[in-house]
Image (cartoon, rainbow, N blue to C red):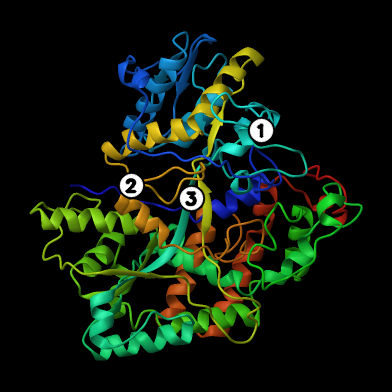
Amino acid sequence: MRKSSKYLSVSMAAILLASSVTGCGASSGATDAAADTTASIAGTSQAAAEATTAESTAETSGATDDNTITICMQNDPGKKEGWEAVAKSYMALHPDINIVVDLKASDNYDQWVQTAFTTADASADLVAINLAGDACTGKSINYMDYLDNDSPYSDGAWRDQFDVSQQQVDMSTGTMDALSLETVQVIWLYNQNIFDEVGIEAPTTWDELVDVCKKLQDAGYQPIAMDGDYNSFYAQTMGWLAQVYADQTTRSIVNTTRAQKGDYCYDPDIDGTWEYDPSDPWNDDADKLTQNPVRAFAAIKDGTYSGNTPGMKTVWGNFAKVFPEYVGGDAFFGTNADGAKTLFYQGKAAMMVNGAWGIVDFNNDMSSVASGKDVEDSAGNKIENISSFKLGTFNMPSMEGEGIEAKARTIEVSNGFIGCISKNQEHDDKVVDFLMYYSSKEGMSSFMEGALAGGYVPNGPSLVYDVEYPEDIQAAFDSLTVIGNVQKDFNNALARGLGESAETFREFYEYSYDYLTGSISLDDWADKHEENIMSHFSAALKEKGLGESDLANPQNEPTGN
């Protein structure tokens, strides 16, 4: 079976950063109570089984039909089958409604969805709003207007069906326009057989990781399989690690970036009682306090928030103890994600960093091997000489030393970003009713059953309460331990430079490569990192909808001037 490539974009943090200033989304917030019901993927209603199959094609624009809801999310493996299944179940309950499943290719989707938001009478309803940029401003449905409404598909309000606290909510404006019902967690995977042979245990600190690597290499194994090409530093593993460990050094910056009394976004109900506590990994979640983006950029400009700090030097000094020596030497920089997976599957390397979906992928692939089927990488190439082994997992080992302020967290985010193009009140109400069903135990069960049958690999547990998975997937998710999310507001805004330009990421890769290969010193790396940040400061400021005059008056709502 060909495996699709999973990209957990490290740009997600920048999306949150941008949306807290301008655009459509923002950071998470709000609390809720779990429903005391259970659901199973095992089956759907009899009515759903007898319903007419959902349509799979549609025009991308045209006059709005109030009784037609068009789903134009991205066409990832299994998603079409999942959306068609939940559409069939919903239409069985609402025969007057027609659900059209018209998924779009991922390539150039951002351009397509931005056009959809600016096209008069667009037929698209459900879209991936995180890729819409500023085009969706003022043009999307605000779910906050509906969260407290009674749901026809549960015993309470809509908010009681799923974990609202994990959603992106702009607390200062009361706006939530992205519905994300799947979780993502970045973890370490390891070969338990090799660990047992060498007599080592999963590390909990970075120093322990270095020691484990040395013992594995002495035993003849490559300690870590990891991609080290440009894409890794920009959007995959090295980029993830850069964010995770920068976060250990910047937890206290929230005391500078938080909304102060008198600020335009200050909420006395939460900001007036919040206290800094770095021992609590959820202390700086958006439902705990409000952060002011103007104060964040002002701190970067005046040097209060810098990329050249003792903490950042501790992080990259520790990276140099592992990369590239224990990740294949110079071959590390020429290894992509498929190459890393191959080394791990062949039992040549003992550890790798992946998302929690990697557990499900691994179990599926080992089942294929056991049944004599081929396993392929994302490019369709057969992975040869796969070695079956027991899989173990561990969370991010914490770094220790100068400038380290708290234990390591990881990337733990909600995913999905289902937004809706707002049309008229009657139509919007019907679209939200469908989403209420989709986000119910019955609706998500229908979606998951269809999606899994179509080859879908969940990123992590659903945020819809009490949804159950097949036993092997449920066991994989039960093994996970949450440790807090690093991708929020401004704590890792400087991890790879500043802003989202290609130049920023290319420069970050080049001087990081030079440092890890010994061409420049750690001090040189830190100097170049700060130069990168400041050289792109003006562009990043504009990108976030801020202007220089805003920085002089951070208490005022930004004007962009």
The amino acid sitting under disc 1 is Leu
Q: Is residue 197 above or below residue 343?
A: below
Question: In whole angstroms, how far apart are the C-alphas of marks 1 and 2?
Answer: 28 Å
Along the line of sight, which residue is nearer the eye, 117 or 515? 117
Q: Position of residue 51 (x, y in %)?
A: 34, 15
Q: Earlier in the sequence, mark 1 or mark 2?
A: 1
User: Based on the displayed image, in which of its 4 quarters is residue 79 positioned?
Assistant: top left
Q: Nearer the viewer, mark 1 or mark 3?
A: 1
Q: Position of residue 308 (x, y in %)?
A: 64, 76
User: Based on the displayed image, in which of its 4 quarters is residue 173 positioned?
Assistant: top right
Question: In whole angstroms, how far apart are the C-alphas of marks 1 and 3?
Answer: 20 Å
Under circle 2, the secondary element is: loop
The image's mark for residue 457 is 2
The image's mark for residue 183 is 3
Q: Is residue 515 above or below residue 77?
A: below
According to the picture, the residue beneath numbered tag 1 turns out to be 147
User: Based on the displayed image, in which of its 4 quarters is residue 401 positioned?
Assistant: bottom right
Q: Position of residue 33 (x, y in %)?
A: 64, 45
Which residue is at the far right?
262
Under circle 1, the secondary element is: loop
Question: In whole angstroms, how far apart are the C-alphas of marks 3 and 2?
Answer: 12 Å
